[in-house]
Image (cartoon, rainbow, N blue to C red):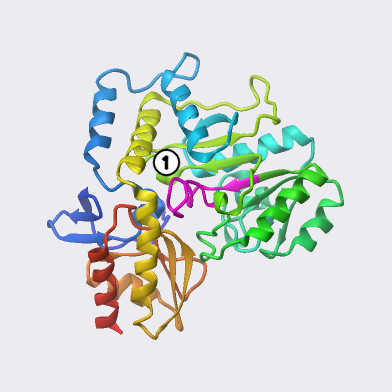
Amino acid sequence: MKLFDVYPLFDVTPVRARDVYIFDDQDTQYLDLYGGHAVISIGHAHPKYVESITQQLNQIGFYSNAVKNPFQVQLAEELTLDSNCENYKLFMCSSGAEANENALKLASFHTNKHSIIAFENAFHGRTSAAVASTDNAKIIAPLNAQQKVDFHPLGDLEAVENTLKKGETCAVIIECIQGVGGLDQSTTAFCQGLEILCKTYGAVLIADEVQSGFGRSGDFFAFQKHGIKPHIISMAKGMGNGFPVGGILIHPEIKASFGLLGTTFGGNHLACVATLSVLKALKAQNLMQNAKEMEVYFREQAKDISEIVNLKGRGLMLGLEFEFPVSELRKKLLFQHKIFTGSSKNPNLIRILPPLTIRKEHIDSLFKALKHIL
């Protein structure tokens, strides 16, 4: 039996990892500047993280959501404080696509409307409504295409309002920093304008923080920089540092009766303990501040390479944009220097999503390799 093709594979078999490094079956060391799609937030095999999960697994690793789970309550309280979203409620699932799917479903239940506004180059997942809200025709199946989604340019408030005036929109979903789309950012004026429009026309504002959340932008959530309060916040990836965790934070005005949302694996004991361990490490090691400082250092080093025409993104969610396509540079040449990086919809852009524990010497390794190659 063969595996179904999903991604083109690097010719490497990782067998262990520590902090910002991965080691293959030949014990070759690789610098991980991609974090497995922005998943590794506090570093590979973080000692306190491993200890917490191991201890919990020796107690109880899983039971369904038909019983009380005090870890869920503790996590909800801590997330409320970290995000400054007072009285929001937490629903947990197991992935970012699930988080966005449930966010969109809840918005439709709440408004009794069926249309969605999303933005050009958006990526929200591969499940039904999430993939329909993703600006990539190649991965939208005929079944998903039946969902009514209006795509507008990022920053065009007039286009958004013209659609909202029709009275059919249940939700506006936005990545304040686009990930797969190529690291374009929303302005504060645009985000605040969206918030006003959603309130005016009765639509639910959803902030997709699946990739940008949990400190990656330098703030706990990327939307916090803009001083807005979305109705629903979706999250995953760095939330579990490798353990499959996702969730949504829900504004108190959005009511849900029993049975509207449900999950088998979401919010299990191990998932909650993993997330609580991530939160603890983010604070104890001041990793959000480190993300801000390392962004500054990235920008300083990028100035020395004339072929880099732009450095996009924020915190440790960055894109090095070159004046030429970077596929060979990233997949072959940087990989020969034992460095993992990522791609995006922009063919000229290398995506940088390292563990938030990255230090200056690791950034130096990347730019030394780039200078040697170029």
> Compared with residue 320, is residue 255 higher up or lower down, i.e. above or below?
above
Q: Is residue 200 left or right of residue 290?
A: right
Q: Nearer the viewer, residue 308 or 242?
A: 308
Residue at the spot of label 1: 239
Q: Is residue 162 left or right of residue 192?
A: right
Residue 249 location in percent, x, y? 57, 35
Q: Residue at x 59, y 31 (%)?
A: 88
How packed is label 1: few (under 14 Cα within 10 Å), some, or many (20 or more)? many
Q: Secondary structure at mark 1?
A: helix
Residue 108 location in percent, x, y? 73, 37
Q: Looking at the rendering, which quadrant does residue 104 occupy?
A: top right
Q: Amino acid at mark 1?
A: Met
Q: Over which residues does the magenta segment extend? A: 206-222
- The answer to whether residue 362 is visible is yes
Q: Quadrant of the C terminus?
A: bottom left
> Compared with residue 120, is residue 17 higher up or lower down, i.e. above or below?
above
Outermost residue, left direction?
27
Residue 58 location in percent, x, y? 24, 20
